[in-house]
Image: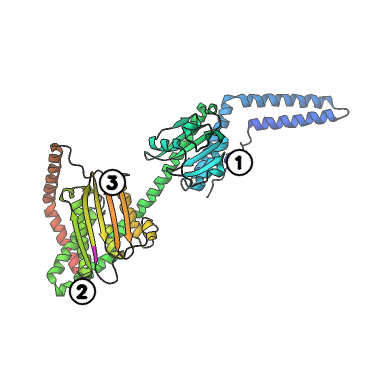
């Protein structure tokens, strides 16, 4: 891990202060003292040298005392030390709160507090531990203290003055830890871990120690949020690029055009229908790229996409079924929620022989809406299924799945779920759980408002129909010309 170069020689992250007034005065005092000792060691010591050395020594000592006792100087030294410590911690967390970074942070904090041990955890396990009983608390071990679980659950700082409050593993009487401060680490409004300081005596927990614990917990949380934001920014850029590539996929484009071209002589009416649907499909794709849409519109777009693939492969190779509760069709969803999953099934699940059937179901489960996309294709191994959301997937499957998952979390909240289950040779099932989306309207007024909005939408579409018709005709003409060129 790369480290920023510093102007100081550091030990566990805290640097030796640069040459300043205190050090200059101390150096002069030391030289004067050496001169005094040397003068006294001479058989006939020169009195002028003795007087001068004594005067310099006395003045230097007085200067050192005054400088060290000056409040501004003390605060400056403390501030410099804390800034160096904070800088070292930020450097250590360049790649996020990994186990290696957590251990380094704990080792940086330990000598700068009165604690005998410092620990960092996520919500399940220890990430780093330094100090007393360090060998018994390796990274990866499950959280064992009840106070840590309570801090994560409540999201509040805990100051614990007895071993019983800490909830240490037995036997408590043999443990030197008698008190602790447990600070929650908040990232985006949720607790992502804890920072813990352990003490041998409750009297060690002073206001200064509390301030240190709280301040460094905030610093860690801020850095964790910054790393997560940078990760999300990179992921968003990757997802946006992948979405654009999917929207105008040259393979899908040319396959569809070739399919339409093949029907021009054998079934002109079908070719005309597919061509119109093709124009609507791409117009919808571009229109839906940034807005929320109804589940009915999303399923309609999925059906339209599947029709092109069906025309290409034929009824003997593909089948598609949709079973959605009518009460859920007005539910608003992010666009491209179901289509990428159906597209993945066609690309990756189709057997070399036989028929692939893809089914989409949408039902209410209590207050939640559950959307299931399943197929009876080739399936996946447990390892592939477990790593399905990895963006690094060389097939591109992981990018599409990660995209759907992240947009679900962003739209429906952290309780939204996407679960992949698959059996090799039998098929794959993707379950999307949208929490709280099946709740009925709170009152008749809400229903009336929803109806009014729907009517407004219909009226708006009617008002724009003339303009869109002209645009569709132009698009249709261009595609017809392109198909004619391909078929020649």
Name the residue beneath numbered marker 1.
11
Say if the magenta span includes residue 467: no
Q: Is residue 356 above or below residue 56?
A: below
Q: Where is residue 322 in the image (x, y as percent from the top left)?
A: 19, 58
Residue 88 visible from this viewpoint: no
Q: Residue at x 19, y 71 (%)?
A: 261
Q: Is residue 103 above or below residue 359?
A: above
Between residues 300 and 277, which one lies in front from this camera angle?
300
Judged by depth in the image, the label closer to the viewer, 2 or 1, is 1
Residue 442 falls left or right of residue 70: left
Q: Residue 411 carries which label?
A: 3
Secondary structure of residue under mark 1 = strand
Q: Where is residue 62 in the image (x, y as percent from the top left)?
A: 68, 23
Judged by depth in the image, the label closer to the viewer, 3 or 2, is 3
User: Residues in magenta?
Assistant: 349-357
Cβ atoms at labels 3 and 1 below 8 Å apart:
no
Q: Give the mark nearer the N terminus: 3 vs 1.
A: 1
Cβ atoms at labels 3 and 2 below 8 Å apart:
no
Q: Give the mark nearer the N terminus: 2 vs 1.
A: 1
Q: Distance between the residues labelled 2 and 1?
A: 75 Å
């Amino acid at each position: 891990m790369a480290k920023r170069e510093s102007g100081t020689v550091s030990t566990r992250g805290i640097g030796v202060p640069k040459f300043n007034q205190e050090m200059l005065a101390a150096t002069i005092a030391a030289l004067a003292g050496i001169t005094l000792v040397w003068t006294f060691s001479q058989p006939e010591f020169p009195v002028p040298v003795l007087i001068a050395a004594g005067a310099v020594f006395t003045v230097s000592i007085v200067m050192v005392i005054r400088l060290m006792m000056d409040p501004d100087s003390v605060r400056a030294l403390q501030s410099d030390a804390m800034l160096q410590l904070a800088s070292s911690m930020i450097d250590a967390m360049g790649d996020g709160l990994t186990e290696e970074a957590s251990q380094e942070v704990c080792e940086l904090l330990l000598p700068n507090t009165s604690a005998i041990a410092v620990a960092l955890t996520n919500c399940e396990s220890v990430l780093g531990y330094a100090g007393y009983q360090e060998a018994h608390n390796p990274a990866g071990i499950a959280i064992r203290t009840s106070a840590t679980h309570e801090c994560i659950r409540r999201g509040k700082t805990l100051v614990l003055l007895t071993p019983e409050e800490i909830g240490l593993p037995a036997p408590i009487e043999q443990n030197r830890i008698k008190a602790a401060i447990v600070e929650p680490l908040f990232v985006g409004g949720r607790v992502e871990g804890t920072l813990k300081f352990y003490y041998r005596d409750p009297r060690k927990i002073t206001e200064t120690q509390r301030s240190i614990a709280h301040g460094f917990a905030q610093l860690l949380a801020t850095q964790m949020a910054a790393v997560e934001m940078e990760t999300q920014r990179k992921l968003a850029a990757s997802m946006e690029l992948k979405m654009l590539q999917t929207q105008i996929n040259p393979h899908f484009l040319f396959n569809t055009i070739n399919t339409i071209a093949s029907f021009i002589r054998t079934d002109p009416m079908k070719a005309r229908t597919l061509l119109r649907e093709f124009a609507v499909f791409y117009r919808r794709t571009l229109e839906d790229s940034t807005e929320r849409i109804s589940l009915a519109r999303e399923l309609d777009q999925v059906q339209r996409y599947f029709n092109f693939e069906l025309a290409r492969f034929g009824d003997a190779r593909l089948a598609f079924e949709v079973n959605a509760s009518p009460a859920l069709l007005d539910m608003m969803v992010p666009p491209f929620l179901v289509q990428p999953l159906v597209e993945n099934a066609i690309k990756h699940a189709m057997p070399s022989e036989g028929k692939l059937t893809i089914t989409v179901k949408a039902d209410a489960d209590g207050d939640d809406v559950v959307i299931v996309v399943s197929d009876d294709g080739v399936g996946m191994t447990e390892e592939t299924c477990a790593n399905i959301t990895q963006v690094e997937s060389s097939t591109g499957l992981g990018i599409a799945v990660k995209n759907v998952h992240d947009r679900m979390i962003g739209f429906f909240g952290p309780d939204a779920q996407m679960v992949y289950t698959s059996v090799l040779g039998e098929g794959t099932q993707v379950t999307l759980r949208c929490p709280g989306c099946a709740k009925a309207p709170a009152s008749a007024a809400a229903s009336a408002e929803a109806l009014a909005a729907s009517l407004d939408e219909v009226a708006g579409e009617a008002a724009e129909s003339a303009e869109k018709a002209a645009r569709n005709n132009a698009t249709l003409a261009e595609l017809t010309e392109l198909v004619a060129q391909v078929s020649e």
